[in-house]
Image (cartoon, rainbow, N blue to C red):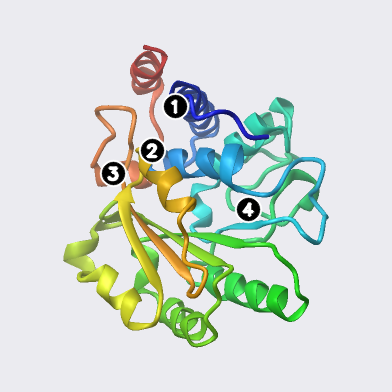
Amino acid sequence: MEIEDDFLQYEEISRRVRISVLNMIHKTGSPHIGPCFSIVEILVALYFKSLNASPESTVDPDRDRFILSKGHACPALYAVLSERGFMSREDLKGFAVNGGTLEQHPAQDLSRGIEVSTGSLGHGLSIAAGTALAGRVDSKQYKVYVLLSDGELNEGSVWEAVMFAGHHKLNNLIALVDYNRMQALGGTGDIMGLEPLGEKWRAFGWHVREIDGHDFRQIFDALSSLSTEKPNVLILHTVKGKGVSFMENQVLWHYRSPDDEEYEEALKELLQ
């Protein structure tokens, strides 16, 4: 499903996704609402325009693959998959409950559009690189997209995969870095500085774009002008907790669930 570039439609889908995430997290007392909210626009852009994947082609060998390496933000992925028709609203009610359908980290379920089980940070890019290389060997045209957190870049295995992909010139691999500048215990710049981030990826042979990760025009432009010679990375400058004023750029919303009063206040903002 691809909708025309009426950006109000994408923004409306993003608003509904954030409401779904808020509902799931509040109902179950789950963490990670901040990192969920920072990736909503890129997920909507992928699933409603750029990704060659649909609910009717979940096992098609030629489908594009998406891997959520920052698996703790899976409520956002679940909400987008539901909006796109890969899973039902009833499935979302089964999030993080005994006997439910959806776990607090993604568990592979191709029927619902979940390609890979993730959650232990530092693995997703390696899986994506291997999948991209397999596609080349098998003469497939699919692309592999993988979304990482900026805190995840502290993991050494990420840079091994970056080096591997650059060496093999995996031009069917697209890494997406959610650069909200916060991780579980503080700012990324305080815990493990990443700058100059773009230059590091370039040094390993990647094509790099840095964009506003909440601006659909910039996202679509970047996704439509990927390098055909190198692996691609989009560094998405985002806001942790985007969409709810009192959650934005506040590290406590990495792990805290809103109480009833905070839920009502957040819902009021998202409904405006």
Please determine whether, in this image, residue 23 is positioned above or below residue 52: above
**Local secondary structure at mark 2:** helix
Disc number lying in front (2 or 4): 2
Q: Is residue 130 left or right of residue 256?
A: right
Q: Earlier in the sequence, mark 1 or mark 3?
A: 1
Query: Which residue is labeled 1 in the image?
Result: 7
Q: Position of residue 94 (x, y in %)?
A: 69, 34
Q: Which residue is the site of mark 4? A: 106
* Camera-nearest label, 2 or 3: 2
Q: Whole-percent x and y of residue 245?
A: 25, 27
Q: Kindly give the residue lying farthest to the left in the view shown.
A: 190
State how far apart marks 2 and 4 are (Cα).
29 Å
Between 32 and 200, which is closer to the camera in this rendering?
200
Three-letter residue code for mark 3: Leu
Asked whether 212 or 71 is in front, the reply is 212
Instruction: Tell me if mark 4 has few (under 14), some (14-19) or many (20+) residues whose alpha carbon lies within 10 angstroms of its own.
Output: many
Q: CA distance from mark 4 to mark 3?
A: 23 Å
The kind of residue tagged 2 is Arg
Marks 1/3: CA–CA distance: 31 Å
Identify the residue under disc 2.
Answer: 217
Q: Amino acid at mark 1?
A: Phe
Q: Quadrant of the N terminus?
A: top right
Any mark on residue 252, and which? 3
- Give whichever of discs 2 and 4 has the lower sequence position: 4
Q: Earlier in the sequence, mark 2 or mark 3?
A: 2
Residue at x 58%, y 75% (from the top left corner) = 129
Taking the spot 82% from the left edge, 41% from the top edge, the residue there is: 56
Q: Is 137 positioned to the left or the right of 209 in the image?
A: right
Label 4 with label 3: CB-CB less than 8 Å: no
Label 3: few (<14), some (14–19) or many (≥20) C-alpha neighbours in 10 Å: some
